[in-house]
Image (cartoon, rainbow, N blue to C red):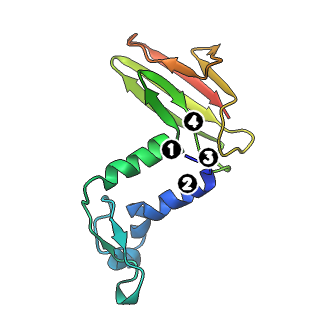
Amino acid sequence: MLGYGDKAAEYFRIINPIEHTRTKEAVNRYKVEPYVVAADVYGVGNLIGRGGWTWYTGSSSWMYKAGIEYILGLQIHNQTLSIKPAIPKEWKEYSIRYEYETSVYNIKIKNPNGKNTGVEKFICNGEEIEKKCVKLIDNGKINEIEITM
């Protein structure tokens, strides 16, 4: 939320359960499901690296929200779509496919200058949008959005 994209991605990786299960050794240490957010990971004694309190209510939804809204930057408020990324500087490009009713929004975010945050240009279906947001419409079409940071 502060725009520190490098730190946001680093912290997201730290809490991501798949990062704790990349090797057989890591799986044997972590000892919990690789597809569930653990509420804690032990840091002392003979349990270092072991996950605990999995299936904890709300943790997965907050992780989803952090990844989609706060890092990738997809914001939907009052049927208005905007992109407010906070990504690592080395990410040069990423894309999001968002479905709204019968419409599809293909969103491509380009980061040619290696920025953490900020939107310079917002183009929807070939037209630059000064407000850098669009009202979602159910037009049954594929809508193309191109963002330049």
Residue 125 picture location, percent across and down: 57, 14
Residue 148 position by quadrant: top right
Residue 33 picture location, percent across and down: 28, 65
Residue 53 picture location, percent across and down: 26, 68
Q: Distance between the residues labelled 2 and 1?
A: 8 Å
Residue 3's disc is 3
Front-lying residue, 85 or 3: 3
Residue 146 position by quadrant: top right
Residue 18's disc is none
Tell me the element at label 1. helix
Residue bearing the label numbered 4: 84
Q: How far apart are marks 3 and 2 (CA)?
A: 8 Å
How many numbered discs?
Answer: 4
Q: Distance between the residues labelled 2 and 4?
A: 13 Å
- Crowding at label 2, few (<14), some or many (≥20) Cα neighbours within 10 Å? many
- The residue that appears at 33% across and 48% down in the rendered structure is 61
Q: Which of marks 1 and 2 precedes in the sequence?
A: 2
Residue 8's disc is 2
Labelled pair 2, 1 in contact (Cβ < 8 Å): yes
Residue 129 picture location, percent across and down: 62, 17
